[in-house]
Structure formats: structure tokens, C-alpha cells
Amino acid sequence: MDDEVPGTNPTIYDVAKAAGVATSTVSRTFSRPGRVNAETADRIRKVAHELGYRVNPLTHGLPTGRTSLLAVVVADVTNPFFFEIIRGAEKTASDAGYTLLVVDAQESDEAERQALDRTLPLVEGLVLATSRLSDSSIRVVAKQRPTVVMNRAMTDVPSVLTDNAQGMRRAVEHLAGLGHTSLTYVAGPEASWADGMRWRAFREATHELDLQARRHGPFAPTLAGGLSAAKVLVKHRTTAAIAYNDLVAIGAMRGLVRLGVDVPRDMSVVGFDNIFGSDFCTPPLTTVAAPLRHFGALAVQRLLVQLRSSPPGTSAPTLLPAKLVERGSTARRG
């Protein structure tokens, strides 16, 4: 093809588009040829050859099309938030006879798309944990393989999430109870669905309690992002801050101390997720806790239901409770 981009690897989507068929038809042509009309199958193979599309040998070599592989796609494998999620997901997958692949999207929607192009032919289903893709892109993926999304509410794709609104309200009420009247939300990535929900819940809770509310960010969901946030917090001083996640909160506390701000005497800090290590920092971090291992296990359970039965229809998201864990990073306003 003259308009092909040199050096790119054609995907099953490219073959489907060029042949004028669904991607599922292309998949069946190579994995279950007896289920595709012979004329259609010949056309698909010809198009695939012209495009230079190569069938994945793992799935092509299995007459049933089964690989017993599942995938969990995480935004950043180095983020401790995912440690327990992966543990719970892996245990549930293993108990059901599946092997779990972990895919790192590196906080990039483009990297996530590329990873999915390579992963979809290999696996029978996947869990998208904190995906940076748009809802429409996720729907495209869900049409190719059974899919469950985490930390995002979708009615047409099975989803599992923690109660962000409940958790944020508990954090705001906690700080208000300590006498804080001016609160700041330290935002995470703009593409994060959870960040949008937490900011919305923050605004609603502070409004209901008649508190002053401010937002800074976005910041990278990392310790470095928190260090950057500390510089902004010092310039726009408030007595309490709620961060997008624990890494940002811990980074902010480190930065504040370096800038001469005592936590919690001068400023209280609250995180989100209760990751491994949130109680190891100084001071130990007050945070909104999510049942992370159960979170991962439940996502795979919902995926297994799809694999064992018909595709899901419209369903309400599965909502897990969130609770506030009070530690040393918050104190009564001085």
C-alpha cells in the first residue's frame, strides 16, 4: 500500500478496516477458520498479506483460540497503589486457571494504545486499571475482548471503583472538625477520571460545609509531582491540603518541610488510597483508604463472569466503600 507509514506494524484493526469487516471476523479467520465464510476468509488473508500483518503465533497455534491469559493494564507499575491490586487480581486469575500479564502504560494514553495493540491478540480478557484512554476508546477495546475498567464509572462496560465522593467527604469533614476553614485540593493528571470525581466531591463537600476551596494542579501522580505542589502550596498558603493520591501527598510533605513548613502544625495534609508505605513516612499520612487487594480481585471476578457467560448488558458500576485512616499528618488548626 502506497500510503502505509514505513516501519509501522499493521494491527488487526487495520486489516479489518481494509477488508471492510469487523475485527472479530478477522480474529476468527485466523483462530477459527471454519466459522468464517470461505470467500470472506480468503479476502481477509489477502488483505493481511498485502498489509504485512502477522498473526500472533500464540493464538494462531491454539485451535480453540484460548490462551488462558488475562491482562491488567496499569498506569504506572512503579506506583505502590497497584501493588495490592495486582496481588488480588493475580490470585483470583490463578485460582481460575489463568495467568495474568501486567502491562505498564507509563501514564501515557499513546503508550497504552500501543500496548493494547500488542496485548489484545494474546489474551482472553483484560482489566484496565486507571486507564488514561477516553470512554469511546475503551468501548472499542471492549468490543474486541471482555473488559473491566477500574476507577471509572461506565454503564456499558463493567466497572469497579471506590466511593470517591464518600471518601472525599470524610476527608473534608475531618479537616473541618479540626478547625480548618480554607482547604486546597492538589490535583492529579487531567486524564484521570478519579481526579475529576475527587475534585467534584471536594467542591461539593466544602460548599456544603461553608469552607473556602482552592485547587492547584495538575501535578504528576508521583513524589516529584508532590514536591512541585509544595512550592505552590507555600505561595498560596492554606492550613490544609487534600492530595490526589498518597504519592503526591508524601512528596508535598517532603517539599513543605524543606521549605520550612511544619506538617501538621503549620499545614495538615491528607492523601488518597492508603498505599504501602503511607504509614512509614514522617509524619505518617492521614489518607482515604481503599480495599486495594479486594479491588483487584473483584475486577478479575467480573471479568471471569464475562468469559463464562454471554457479553454483559448495561449494568451499574460496582462501588467499594472508602474510609478515612487518621494518622499524624493532620492536626487541629493552630
Image: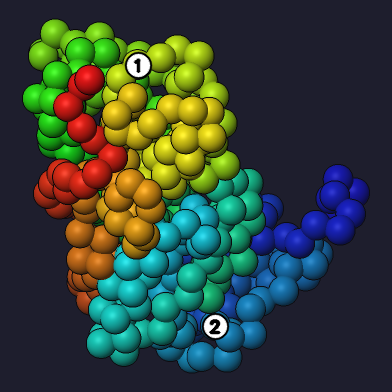
Taking depth in this image into account, of 280 and 246 the one nearest to the observer is: 280
Image x and y of residue 219, in percent: 52, 32
Q: Quadrant of residue 181?
A: top left
Q: CA distance from mark 1 to mark 2?
A: 56 Å
* Label 1 element class: loop
Drawn side of residue 209 relative to residue 333, left or right: left
Direction from residue 323 to residue 13 in the image, left or right: right
Residue found at x 25% / y 87%: 95
Q: At which x and y percent is residue 331?
A: 20, 32
Mark 1 in CB contact with mark 2 (< 8 angstroms): no
Type of the residue with mark 2: Thr
Q: In the figure, 37 relative to 206: above or below?
A: below
Residue shown at 47% from the left, 61% from the top: 73
Kind of residue indicated by mark 1: Thr
For residue 238, which numbered disc appears in the image?
Answer: 1
Q: Can you see residue 126?
A: no
